[in-house]
Amino acid sequence: MLPLVLLLGACAGGQDDGGVKDRPEDSDVVGDSGGDDSDDSGGDDSDPDDSGPDDSGEAQTPGWSNLVFPLIQARCDDCHDYWGPESELAYQRLTETRGAEPALVTAGDAAGSLFYQKLGPTPPKGGQMPLQVPEVSEAKIEAIRDWINDGAPEDQLWTVFGELYKGAGSCWNCHRGWGEAGPSNTSALQATLLSRSVGGYTLVVPGDASRSLLYLKLVPSEVPFGQAMPLSYSFVSEEDLTGIAAWIDAGAVFD
């Protein structure tokens, strides 16, 4: 999740936004790193750093965890650190009102949401976003529109595994080293799951549950070596297995 630069908000005159770095005083764009809004890079159409739906035209289900938050992490966080980096905080920042200013995302109303408007060529404030990086593809913009119009739900896909990890007698009992400071330290837990390999299998391969040891060890018929997990605990339900697989397949974003 390489942080690049995506600037989507606009700032009312004089309103402070402490999470935006190096904003010039005369800018009307939140997080503007310099120059006027016309100085977009333009980019190409390859859209290499977007997360979420691909551009193949196939039907995709837009969501917070598998589209919007990964986009913020990849292309907004450098300048809009006020939005995150935690998913819950980012969602709050986008959907809360700030003084007289409306929320950047108004659930059910993409056309009236500045977050969506700034992705288009003629936003009501400032210039089109992102600046200095390739523009977001039409497919992803449409997916973001659909997500907002569907109520901008904050789906937290990692919650199913999070509860399993923290539950008494489950992962946390034996795998305390995964989280270092504890199950609430999601940054350490995420770093461990994405980097640690055992027996040639990485614990979590974002986008592919079928190659993720974490998931394979929870399915008795798929265990590549050793015993099914968790030990000394009832096996994970089919519903929860489906949820954990969905979280990994969606990119293993930690909400």
Image (cartoon, helix red, strand yellow):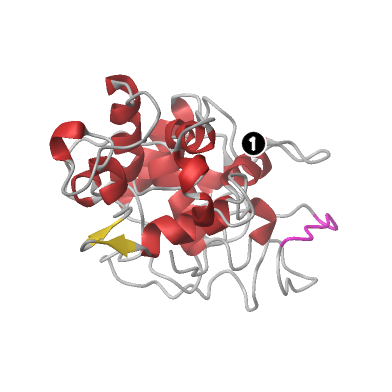
Q: Residue at 25% across / 66% down in the picture? A: 46
Q: Is residue 116 left or right of residue 137?
A: right
One can see residue 135 in this view: no
Decide: few, some or many residues near mark 1? Use Cα within 10 Å; few <14, some 14-19, many ≥20.
some
- Give residue 120's position: percent from left, percent from top: 45, 51
**Which of the 4 image quarters holds residue 87?**
top right
Q: Main secondary structure of the magenta part?
A: loop
- Give residue 43's position: percent from left, percent from top: 36, 72
One can see residue 92 in this view: yes
- Give residue 162's position: percent from left, percent from top: 49, 37
Residue sitting at the far bottom: 35
Residue 15 covered by magenta stretch: yes
Q: Residue at 60% across / 55% down in the picture? A: 85
Q: Residue at 30% across / 66% down in the picture? A: 48
Q: Amino acid at mark 1?
A: Thr
Q: Residue at 28% across / 41% down in the picture? A: 215
Q: Nearer the viewer, residue 85 or 217?
A: 217
Q: Nearer the viewer, residue 233 or 88?
A: 233
Q: Quadrant of the N terminus?
A: bottom left
The residue to which callout 1 is attached is 95
Residue 236 covered by magenta stretch: no
Q: Nearer the viewer, residue 79 or 246?
A: 246
Q: Is residue 124 left or right of residue 1?
A: right
Secondary structure, mark 1, is: helix
Q: Which residues are magenta?
A: 13-19
Q: Is residue 153 left or right of residue 141?
A: right
**Which of the 4 image quarters holds residue 168?**
top right
- Is 45 rendered above or below residue 11? below
Q: Nearer the viewer, residue 219 or 143?
A: 219
- Give residue 110's position: percent from left, percent from top: 50, 34
